[in-house]
Amino acid sequence: MIDEFDDAISPPFEIHEPETWRAPIIFNSPHSGSVYPAEFLAATRIDHDALRRSEDSFMDEIVGHLADEGFPVMRVHFPRCYVDVNREPYELDPRMFDDRLPSFANTRSMRVAGGLGTIPRVVGDGQEIYRERLAVDEALARIDLLYKPYHRALRRLATKAQQMFGYAIVADCHSMPSIGVSREDKRRPDVVLGDRYGTSCAGMLADAVEETFAALGYSVGRNKPYAGGFITEHYGNPASSLHTIQIELNRAIYMDERRRERGPQFRKVAADFSALAEALTALRFDSSGPFEAAAE
């Protein structure tokens, strides 16, 4: 089975790196993968369309063109409901498995409790994914062959940016449903920025992202309902000149959520991400530490 799902998702992720970097800004799309291994689909109790509701549909396309503009772009091909790289490596739910998990597994996180661990138990709307319990070896193989290589590659890319420019920015790009699970929930802002409540990046970076989107006509929120996941928390270390910010884009802006099709504003939204990249290129580190606007 390991060889089967390894062959089905080849390559498991892609990095599009420009010949000449404009700035050390990495645009990452970890949840837009849509390549579903056949043996995974055979083991699920819900249909393909239900599984796909967990995808950050088309986010990889919205940022993909930025590689042609001088910014590295990373995208994942496998779906988040198969392996979620925006979790700790071993956030695993014991209820999913037919034998004992290793002692190093984190079985008590809030994400595991919600069924959304590294190997998710449910899709975003709470539907159970699997017909039967999984073998622990199956989960560990997915982590070894998909999750770990992805994070090694992202870390290498961030390190390269730091070596070239002295600092790095990871813009972790996601999309969110226009409203929450409850029908009483209000429509969410157009964009929600997550900086782990000011800890994953310099404040002026988060301000610049917010101001750029606001100037483009988007309503912007911060940290609610999304403050940033494992990638934002794990890579964000401003003290070592590595800054991460999570960008959640409201799907209703750029797509038909029900039909899962690109909407009339799709090209405009992609162009607005070019404007964001340009705005962040105008930021630099001052010797005293914080970001400042580059001199004209």
Image: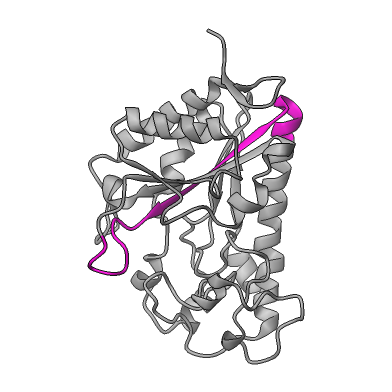
Residue depicted at x 72% and y 20%: 287
Q: Is residue 22 visible?
A: no
Q: In terms of depth relative to the viewer, which is nearer, 63 or 224?
A: 224
Residue 178 belongs to the span the image colors magenta: yes
Residue depicted at x 68% and y 54%: 151
Q: In terms of depth relative to the viewer, which is nearer, 204 or 55?
A: 204
- 243, above or below 88, in the image: above
Q: Give how far across and how far down residue 265 sits, in percent.
A: 26, 39
Q: Is residue 211 visible?
A: yes
Residue depicted at x 49% and y 58%: 33
**How many marks can you see?**
0
Residues shaded magenta: 160-185
Q: Give how far across and how far down residue 164 sits, in percent.
A: 73, 27
Q: Describe residue 222's horizontal placement relative to residue 28 as left or right.
A: left
Residue depicted at x 76% and y 75%: 104
Q: Quadrant of residue 138?
A: bottom right
Q: In terms of depth relative to the viewer, which is nearer, 226 or 42?
A: 226
- Looking at this rendering, what residue extends furthest in the top direction? 296
